[in-house]
Each structure stands twice: as C-alpha cells, then as structure tokens.
Image (cartoon, rainbow, N blue to C red):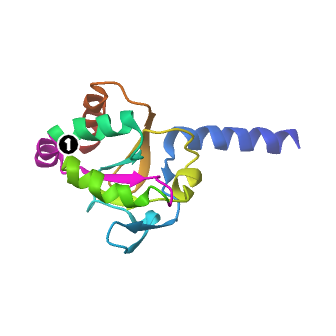
C-alpha cells in the first residue's frame, strides 16, 4: 500500500511538472447567439488569451482597454487572439454588447451568464486571465489587474512562440 501511494505521488509530481490542463467542455454563447464549446477554442496553432470580465468590474474594463491599445501590434507580432468571457448574469447580459462596442474592443466575446466556464476552471474572482498555448494547454493564469500587467501577458506569449 505504501509503495502504491508513493508511486502515485511521484507520478502526480512528475505530471505537475510537464502536463498542462486542457480547457473544460462548457457550452457558451457568442453575442450573436451562436453556441461555442469551450474545449474547442483555438487560434490555428498559435497562443490565445482568455480574459474573464464583467460590465460592472472596473479593473476588468481597465485591463481590456489597456490590451485594446496594443492588441493590433500584438496580433501582428505574435498572432495572439483575445477571447473575452463575460460573466454578467441575466439582468446585465444585455449591457455586454453596448459596453464592447463603446470601448471598441475587437475581441471575440463569449457569454457565461451562469458562470459555468468560470466555475469549471475554479476561478474565484475577476479579472482573471488564462494563456492557452497552440496545443490547447493552459500554460499561465493570473487574477486581478494593475496598470501595466498586460506587458507580462505579451511577454509570456512571446516565450511560447519562440
């Protein structure tokens, strides 16, 4: 029994060093009402960033605004794509599209009104950002936002495409 336990601990430790979590399968909607399975999110073999936000979350909006200022440059340099996931619930869901339009965000936006995707990933607070590599592995996670934090995001993406 001890031997079995030791082997399972060693295997788990090894996997933690080399294995990366995949995105869970959750059905979300686009702002156009199309259904998207989150396990199929991709960027043609290039990294992408998933950014969880809400219309009422000031730090979330600041983060997405800061990224919007450099997004075109990021795309030209690395091919990275941003997928913004709104966790606004039913009563606020109709505010997402106007907010995105008013801010001029050129992101793919998905709606998670029941927080199913957020919960499946174990996310407690927003803003929350994931970087997913070209093979669909979650390779970086970060919560909260401070001015300039977007620089760390693009640095992580640059490391992935080297």
Rendered location of residue 96, percent (x, y): 35, 56
Image height of 84 relative to 14, above or below: below
In percent of the image, x 34 and y 52: which residue is there? 84
Quadrant position of the N terminus in the picture: top right
Is the residue 141 above or below the residue 96 in the image? above
| Residue at 30% in and 34% down | 62
Residue at the location (46% across, 34% down)?
143
**Residue 4, magenta (yes or no):** no
Camera sees residue 2: yes
Residue 137 lies, in percent from the top left, at 43, 51
For residue 107, say whether it is visible: no
Outermost residue, right side: 1
Percent of width and height locating residue 64 = 28, 41
Q: Which residue is mark 1?
A: 68
* Number of marks: 1
Magenta segment range? 70-90
Q: Is residue 45 above or below residue 133?
A: below
């Amino acid at each position: 029994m001890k031997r079995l336990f030791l082997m399972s601990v060693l295997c788990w430790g090894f996997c933690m060093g080399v294995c990366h979590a995949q995105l869970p399968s959750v059905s979300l909607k686009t702002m156009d009402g199309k259904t998207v399975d989150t396990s199929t999110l991709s960027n043609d073999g290039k990294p992408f960033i998933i950014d969880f936000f809400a219309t009422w979350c000031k730090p979330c909006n600041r983060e997405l605004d800061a990224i919007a200022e450099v997004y075109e440059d990021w795309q030209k340099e690395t091919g990275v794509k941003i997928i913004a996931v709104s966790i606004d619930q039913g009563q606020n869901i109709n505010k997402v599209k106007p907010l995105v339009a008013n801010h001029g965000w050129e992101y793919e936006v998905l709606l998670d009104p029941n927080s199913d995707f957020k919960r499946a990933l174990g996310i407690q607070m927003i803003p929350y950002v994931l970087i997913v590599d070209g093979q669909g592995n979650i390779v970086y996670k970060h919560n909260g936002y401070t001015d300039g934090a977007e620089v760390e995001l693009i640095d992580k993406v640059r490391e992935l495409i080297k």
